[in-house]
Amino acid sequence: MAVVKAFRAVRPKKEYASLVAALPYDVMNSAEARQKVKGNKYSFLHVDKAEIDLPEDIDIYDEKVYLKAGENLKKLVSDGVCEQEAKPAFYIYRQIMNGRSQTGLVCCASIDDYLNNTIKKHENTVAAKEADRINHVDYCDANTGPIFLTYRNNAQISAIIESYTENNGSEYDFVSENVRNTVWVIDDDEIIAKLSSLFSAVPALYIADGHHRSASAVKVGLKRREQNPGFTGDEEFNYFLAVLFPDTELAVMDYNRTVRDLNGMSEEGFLQKLSEKFDIEPENEAYRPEKRHTFGLYLGGKWYKMRLKEGVADEADPLARLDVSILQNEVLSPLLGITDPRADKRIDFIGGIRGLGELEKRCSEDMCAAFSMYPTSIADLMAIADSGNVMPPKSTWFEPKLLSGLFIHNLS
């Protein structure tokens, strides 16, 4: 059963919150981050992507980057921009984007829940990316970015959170990146105890976004345990920063694919091969799939609708029936020779937030064809995690992104 823990967050003073809060480190490159922070010395990107404060030619995995991250984090506190909460608390974090709201509980989750699979995963991680975040957490001595977790909706939990937001004033309320971000502080011991008790009956939490950050946080926690053989389990390094959202409030966007070439085939030959497994018809405009097992194809400056033929997918298999699996197993691997999409340089992934126009743009620049996808559902994500399987890479794109810098969890 799930363990959630109140904690003494290091967080911005109210007047600095909108300046400190930043998009997560992995949605932009270093050059974009350097542009983003111009005129804002308080941006949390100075912590999450500290290479922006070092020479442009520095290796982003250089130890100097992690040292600078730790230094910049300490400076936010010493300069009076951020301060640590006086007592352990939970926090409510609400985001509203394009009229849709999602409200989660900010807390600390247990590394043991991750290890015993109470916190379930649906993606593999890449060693180099894990190592980067391990160093970042270790040198900062803190979890700086929250893990995005979900759980099957619990009416009692939702009622408490809704009542609290209706009857208490917010701590932060600002708009960033066209998203309204509102935060409430729960420092009432009775409510904290009630929520902790209710979550202890929740059978599983699921990682929606943040597999690398969670794996790294756990490995740092295990490293600290080795360094402190007399640990009790109550130390902060036994926990990591998370925001828990009920599944009913989340929306998954499409995660589209572009490919660099047709593996030696002509456009006509490729379409002919596709027609063995898909019904294909031309479209007059950019095609966004409206249901499962349909795909858009942009090829030769034209859009096509691809509909999977009956009997191709194994509907009884939660992994095989995913559209991302179907595209990989029926198109990318056998026809285009892209057997390892995680490593193959001939494929790229475009988050749905960038729109279908981005697919057309890439095909006019450096790619040959693009596929628009129907979004993976939260139910599918949970089914995959429950079955112990992992999805193909880049299967889900969540919006809005959780901002970093509003809550920092110190490990000591």
Image (spheres, rainbow, N blue to C red):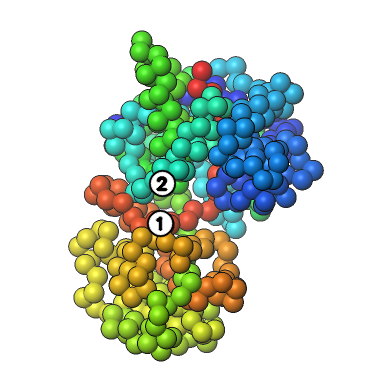
Q: Residue at x 60, y 58 (%)?
A: 98
Q: Which residue is mark 1?
A: 342
Tell me residue 323's x, y (percent): 35, 66
Disc on res. 174: none
Tell me residue 321's x, y (percent): 27, 64
Q: How many marks?
A: 2
Q: Residue at x 58, y 37 (%)?
A: 62
- At label 2, the amino acid type is Val
Q: Which residue is mark 2?
A: 126
Q: Quadrant of residue 312?
A: bottom left
Q: Residue at x 35, y 13 (%)?
A: 229
- Taking the view exactly as shown, the residue that stands out farthest to the top is 230
Q: How far is disc 2 from disc 1 in space, using C-alphas?
A: 9 Å
Q: Are marks 2 and 1 in contact (CB under 8 Å)?
A: yes
Secondary structure beneath label 1: loop
Within 10 Å of disc 2 (Cα), the crowding (few <14, some 14-19, many 20+) is few
Q: Residue at x 46, y 50 (%)?
A: 249
- At label 1, the amino acid type is Arg
* Residue 412 as seen in the image, left or right of residue 219: right
- Taking the view exactly as shown, the residue that stands out farthest to the right is 39
Tell me residue 253's x, y (percent): 48, 60
Report if residue 10 is visible in the image: yes
Q: Quadrant of residue 328?
A: bottom left
Q: Quadrant of residue 157?
A: top left
Q: Is residue 59 above or below residue 198?
A: below
Report if residue 245 is visible in the image: no
Locate the N terminus by quadrant: top left
* Residue 355 as seen in the image, left or right of residue 381: right
- For the residue pair 345 and 295, the one nearer the viewer reads as 345
Q: Is residue 127 above or below residue 223?
A: below
Tell me residue 177's x, y (percent): 66, 51
Secondary structure beneath label 2: loop
